[in-house]
Image: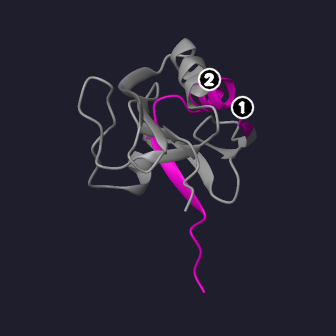
Amino acid sequence: MIKFQYTILYVEDVTKSIEFYENSFGFERKFITPENDYGELNTGDTTISFASKTLATSNLKNGFVESNISQKPFAIELGLVTDDVEKYIHQAIQNGAIIEQEAKQKPWGQTVAYIRDIDGFLIELCTPMHG
């Protein structure tokens, strides 16, 4: 048995990134290391975690492509499900996010929007799928 446990985002400032997610979406932190090089949020069954770019570099000797708000987003997104997409878009923008795609209702009835967090990572905000 194997289970998907967490996603780690490589960021400049772990505390600042965690505060963005707390203030934008109401998640609570599990912990941040005293060195501010790693932290986790309580986000349900799957955890969003953050590692400093310095820590990531120490683990990945060949380096990595850094997320940057001035570049196109990576071909990956974090999916956050809510009944109130507009509320969380507004809160995220107040905390430094930018809109990538305004909220739209899809033909199957789901409302979907895309924003970029303060580190440039792509977030999908959507209503639950009903099937």
Left or right, 24 with respect to 93, comes to right
Question: Along the line of sight, which residue is nearer the eye, 15 or 34?
Answer: 15
Which of disc 1 and disc 2 is earlier in sequence? 1
Q: Residues within 10 Å of mark 2 (few under 14, many from 20)?
A: few
Label 1 element class? loop
Left or right, 97 with respect to 15, comes to left
Q: Is residue 10 magenta?
A: yes
Q: Is residue 52 visible?
A: no
Q: Position of residue 87 (x, y in %)?
A: 62, 23
Quickly name the residue at label 1. Answer: 26
Question: Which residue is found at the position 57% from the left and 56% from the top?
Answer: 130
Question: Along the line of sight, which residue is nearer the eye, 119 or 46?
Answer: 46
Label 2 element class? helix
Counting the numbered discs, the total is: 2
Residue 129 in the image: above or below residue 51:
below
Select label 2 or label 1 by which is in front: 2
Question: Which residue is found at the position 56% from the left and 68% from the top?
Answer: 4
Question: Along the line of sight, which residue is nearer the eye, 33 or 97?
Answer: 97
Q: What whole-number distance in Å separates the C-alpha atoms at marks 2 and 1?
A: 12 Å
Q: Considering the image in quadrants, where does the C terminus appear?
A: bottom right
Q: Position of residue 1 (x, y in %)?
A: 60, 87
Q: Is residue 13 magenta?
A: yes
Q: Position of residue 121 (x, y in %)?
A: 41, 36
Q: Which mark is residue 87?
A: 2
For the record, the magenta segment spans: 1-28
Disc 1 marks a residue whose amino acid type is Gly
Disc 2 marks a residue whose amino acid type is Lys
Question: Which residue is found at the position 43% from the left and 56% from the top?
Answer: 59
Q: Is residue 29 visible?
A: yes
Residue 131 in the image: above or below residue 12:
below
Q: Residues within 10 Å of mark 1 (few under 14, many from 20)?
A: some
Q: Which mark is residue 104?
A: none
